[in-house]
Amino acid sequence: MRKSVKRIGLFFIVGFVTFLMSFSPGCNKSSSGGIAGEIGYAPDIDPNNFVAVIDNPFFTMTPGATFQYEVEKDEGAETIEVYVTDETRVVMGVTCVVVRDTVKLDGELVEETYDWYAQDNEGNVWYLGEDSKEYESGEVVSTAGSWEGGVDGAMPGIIMMGDPQVGDTYRQEYYAGEAEDMAEVISLNETVTVSYGTFANCLKTKDYTPLEPDVIAYKYYSPTLGAVVMEDEVDGNVELVDVITE
């Protein structure tokens, strides 16, 4: 990944699967909203508990949809395009939707990632891995962010809960030392204005990782559209500028 807190993850990103006392496959929510423990993290992924579509209102993935984001950085203008393909990939027996995430800096490709998502029958959207490539001058220079659930100790996490509540914390992904993104639900009634429009009743999350304790981002998701903005003190605010549907 381009940094440990996945910027769009699909911001989309962006994904503690806490061991819930009540269910979701492998997801447990403690009454305190805290983490049930690092050691032994092994969500129960049963392919029979997953559905064919991703229609969580905060994270709907309809094939053919493209979400475009922009951010001004010291290095130049960065554009991010998230495209929901009609392709699928089977991970841990689960059929996932393949989503392509491309990042360009002043028009030059710097990263291309294929993310794999699937929704369980409780409405939770799981993040089961990614194939990530970083580029310099048109050449691949790193694939270090790539991981796949069930391979080499990597485990999937939840990128968006089916019924998020303030105080919920969850693991978005787990690949020791490489991908350990976490999130906490901060609010359910935020109003956000970006160039694409104004959105009410947005979900706000705090995204962070123990790999980089000083890196924190706040993400806002509209219940009608999905991710609309990410506030990041390091990289600036990534904002939705357009949505294209086929």
Image (cartoon, rainbow, N blue to C red):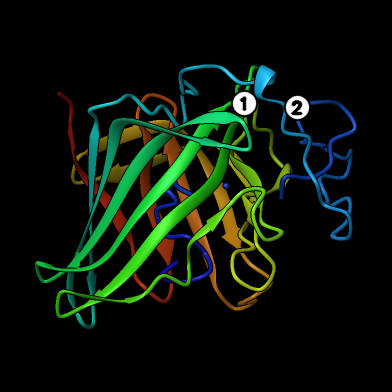
The dot on residue 147 is: none
Q: Quadrant of the N terminus?
A: bottom left
Q: Amino acid at mark 1?
A: Gly
Q: Earlier in the sequence, mark 2 or mark 1?
A: 2
Report whether 9 appears left or right of 77: right
Q: Using the image, determine if residue 26 lies above or below residue 140.
A: above
Q: What is the distance, in whole Å, between disc 2 and disc 1 at their CAs?
A: 9 Å
Horizontal and vertical percent position of residue 71: 24, 64
| Residue drawn at point x = 62 percent, y = 47 percent | 186
Q: Position of residue 57 (x, y in %)?
A: 46, 23
Q: Residues within 10 Å of mark 1 (few under 14, many from 20)?
A: many
Q: Residue at the spot x=65%, y=76% of the render?
A: 213
**Near-viewer residue (108 or 132):** 132
**Residue annotated with mark 1:** 162
Q: Nearer the viewer, residue 156 or 140?
A: 140
Q: Residues within 10 Å of mark 2 (few under 14, many from 20)?
A: many
The label number, if any, that marks residue 24 in the structure image:
2
Image-based side of 187 in relation to 55, left or right: right
Q: Are marks 2 and 1 in contact (CB under 8 Å)?
A: yes
Question: For this rendering, which residue is in front, 200 or 28?
Answer: 28
Please indicate whether residue 115 sits to the left or right of residue 199 in the image. right
Q: What residue appears at the point 15 percent right and 80 percent down from the top-left corner?
A: 137
Question: Considering the numbered disc 1 on the image, is that residue within a helix, a strand or a loop?
Answer: loop
Looking at the image, residue 123 lies above or below residue 12? above
- Residue at position x 64%, y 32% from top? 164
Quadrant in the picture for the C terminus:
top left
- As drawn, 155 above or below 122: below
Mark 2 or 1, closer to the camera: 2
